[in-house]
């Protein structure tokens, strides 16, 4: 498993559905963007269940508040992501293209829930996959697939695998030991009373876990 293609170990999924209020969502993205400068952190902007015009307008505002040197991914199409200045795109599993799209964009991420979906993402030219939920997610109802499922995906994937779903800092090491190149977080950061402190805690947990696996 190649874990060098994606220059971030922590992926913060800025989910509007979880936050609820648009102004607060944008403020959180700005705060996370400031905390991400110079660190191995990417931000995924996710605003589902909106009409395309409103979603595009909000995504444009979100891109404006993320520093230019912080990797920003957009849930949606490559064309929209490029138009709004995002460096990457994120595909939900159902939207993984059947063939490799011709449009150039720096990074392509795909959500996967199975080894079969991993292979679809590989064929579509994804740079990484986000697998979960590993544990019961904190941002919506659901069960966790578990560490063995994560391990099976990381063994089968030629791409870096980012683990997602109910991951607290204390569980980061287990995910890394199961083969994950990093972790993605929604509620653990967006729902934290101190967002910057939460980002710092995840970064420290990742650094310690990665150091432990290479020692």
Image (cartoon, rainbow, N blue to C red):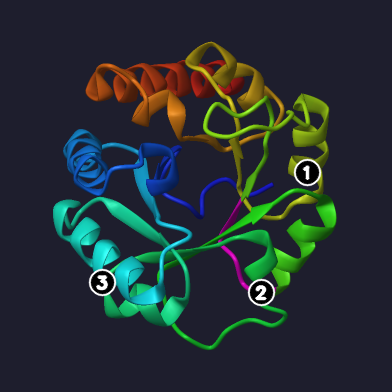
Q: Quadrant of residue 173?
A: top right
Residue 124, numbered label? 2
Name which of mark 1 and mark 2 comes first in the sequence.
2
Is residue 144 or residue 102 the one in the foreground? Answer: 144
Name which of mark 3 and mark 2 comes first in the sequence.
3
Is residue 34 or residue 49 the one in the foreground? Answer: 49
Residue bounds of the magenta highlight:
124-129
Is residue 171 or residue 212 the one in the foreground? Answer: 171
Between circles 3 and 2, the one closer to the viewer is 3
Q: CA separation, marks 1 and 3?
A: 31 Å
Residue, x 41% and y 64% (percent of image)?
50
Q: Position of residue 82 (x, y in %)?
A: 33, 77
Query: How many residues crowd around disc 3 within 10 Å: few (fewer than 14), some, or many (20 or more)?
Result: some
- SS state under label 3: loop
Q: Which residue is mark 1?
A: 153
Any magenta on residue 189? no
Any magenta on residue 128? yes
Between circles 1 and 3, the one closer to the viewer is 3
Name the quarter where the C terminus is drawn.
top right
Query: How many residues crowd around disc 1 within 10 Å: few (fewer than 14), some, or many (20 or more)?
Result: many
Q: Which residue is mark 3?
A: 85
Residue 89, numbered label? none
Q: Position of residue 198 (x, y in %)?
A: 33, 20
């Amino acid at each position: 498993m190649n874990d060098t293609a994606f220059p971030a170990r922590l992926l913060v999924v800025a989910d509007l559905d979880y936050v609820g209020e648009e102004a607060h969502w944008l403020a959180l993205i700005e705060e996370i963007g400031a905390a991400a400068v110079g660190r191995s952190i990417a931000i995924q902007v996710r605003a589902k269940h909106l009409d395309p015009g409103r979603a595009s307008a909000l995504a444009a505002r979100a891109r404006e508040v993320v520093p230019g040197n912080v990797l920003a991914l957009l849930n949606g199409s490559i064309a929209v992501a490029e138009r709004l200045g995002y460096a990457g795109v994120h595909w939900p599993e159902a939207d993984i293209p059947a063939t490799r799209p011709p449009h150039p964009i720096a990074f392509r991420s795909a959500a996967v829930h199975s080894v079969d979906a991993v292979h679809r993402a590989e064929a579509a030219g994804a740079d990484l996959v986000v697998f979960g939920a590993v544990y019961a997610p904190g941002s919506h109802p659901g069960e966790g697939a578990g560490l063995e499922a994560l391990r099976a995906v990381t063994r089968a994937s030629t791409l870096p695998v980012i683990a997602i779903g109910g991951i607290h800092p204390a569980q980061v090491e287990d995910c890394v030991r199961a083969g994950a190149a990093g972790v993605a977080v929604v509620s653990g950061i967006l729902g934290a009373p101190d967002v910057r402190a939460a980002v710092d805690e995840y970064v420290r947990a990742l650094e310690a876990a990665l150091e432990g696996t290479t020692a």
